[in-house]
């Protein structure tokens, strides 16, 4: 989170739209409070917000699959054939960066997402206070629970009730990577949200 805030403050140096997917969406949400001066809006693609609470019974299928994958595959070359078998329609240009991100993934994050121990991924962070403190408009993209969505209803309800200016768009039939499953609908939702944001002032 601190790195994200620093990039906005020291590199971008003007109000921007911050977008995150999966755990990156959690980081984007948490950055909403400390980076308020540099944000026009935030876009959250299927954030696993169950990390905000203790929930030892949360074993979401996607994260459980990633956890099991990393027990036997550590390198990009080992991960690539598994991803290709799971996503046969995706070209190698998409699969290879995906494999690289999984190879870099911190094992502690996988423990947190499968066991509900958020202390491993955001020590000493008050999730609820950060969510309540978001001052800019937020677009929440909700994947289909039947397709392994990371954002479960309990946490979606909390976010929508406490994040000011939050807008929800659901994507029936889309899995955790909405941008890959429904790219046209994904871009339409993003563009419509961005079009409604206040003008950027440098």
Image: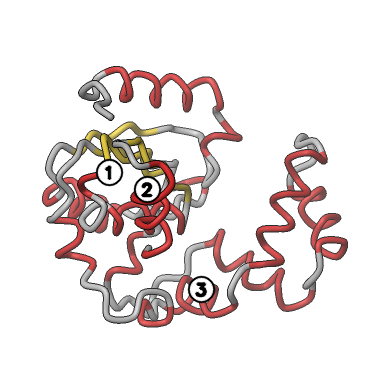
Q: Where is residue 183 in the image (x, y as percent from the top left)?
A: 56, 26
Residue positioned 50% across, 34% down in the render: 173
Instruction: Say what secondary structure mark 3 lies in.
Output: helix
Image coords of residue 6 (percent x, y): 38, 57
Figure quadrant of the C terminus: top left
Q: Return the mark for residue 109.
A: 3
Residue 28 vertical position relative to residue 19 in the rendered view, above or below: below
Q: In this picture, is 200 found above or below 174?
A: above
Among the two numbered marks 3 and 1 on one chain, the one whose residue lies closer to the N terminus: 1
* 47 left or right, relative to 139: right
Q: Distance between the residues labelled 3 and 1?
A: 27 Å
In the rendered structure, are the residues bearing label 3 and label 1 in contact, judged by CB atoms less than 8 Å apart? no
Q: Residue 143 carries which label?
A: none
Q: How many marks?
A: 3
Marks 2 and 1 close (CB-CB < 8 Å): yes
Q: Position of residue 78 (x, y in %)?
A: 85, 65
Which mark sits nearer the N-terminus, 2 or 1?
Answer: 2
Q: Position of residue 147 (x, y in %)?
A: 52, 46
**Residue nearest the observer in this picture, 42 or 66:** 42
Pointer 1 residue: 38
| Label 2: element kind | helix
* Sequence-wise first label, 3 or 2: 2
Q: How far apart are marks 2 and 1 (CA)?
A: 6 Å
Is 117 displayed left or right of 160 in the figure? Answer: right
Q: Decide which of 16, 151 is in the foreground and name it.
A: 16
Residue that appears at 73% across and 58% down: 100
Q: Is mark 1 on a helix, strand or loop?
A: helix
Q: Which residue matches tag 2?
A: 8
Mark 3 or 1: the one toward you = 1
């Amino acid at each position: 989170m601190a790195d994200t805030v620093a990039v906005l403050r020291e590199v971008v140096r003007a109000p921007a739209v911050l977008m995150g997917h999966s755990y990156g969406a959690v980081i984007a949400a948490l950055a909403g409070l400390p980076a308020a001066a540099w944000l026009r809006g935030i876009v959250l693609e299927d954030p696993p917000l169950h990390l905000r609470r203790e929930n030892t019974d949360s074993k979401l299928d996607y994260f459980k699959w990633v956890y099991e994958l990393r027990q036997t595959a550590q390198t990009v070359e080992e991960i690539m054939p598994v991803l290709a078998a799971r996503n046969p329609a995706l070209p190698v240009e998409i699969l290879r960066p995906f494999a690289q991100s999984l190879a870099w993934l911190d094992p502690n994050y996988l423990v947190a997402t499968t066991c509900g121990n958020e202390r491993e991924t955001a020590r000493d962070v008050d999730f609820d206070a950060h969510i309540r403190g978001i001052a800019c408009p937020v677009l929440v993209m909700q994947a289909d629970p039947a397709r392994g969505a990371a954002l479960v209803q309990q946490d979606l309800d909390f976010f929508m009730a406490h994040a000011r200016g939050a807008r929800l768009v659901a994507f029936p039939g889309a899995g955790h990577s909405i941008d890959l499953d429904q790219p046209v609908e994904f871009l339409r939702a993003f563009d419509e949200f961005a079009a409604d944001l206040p003008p950027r002032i440098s």
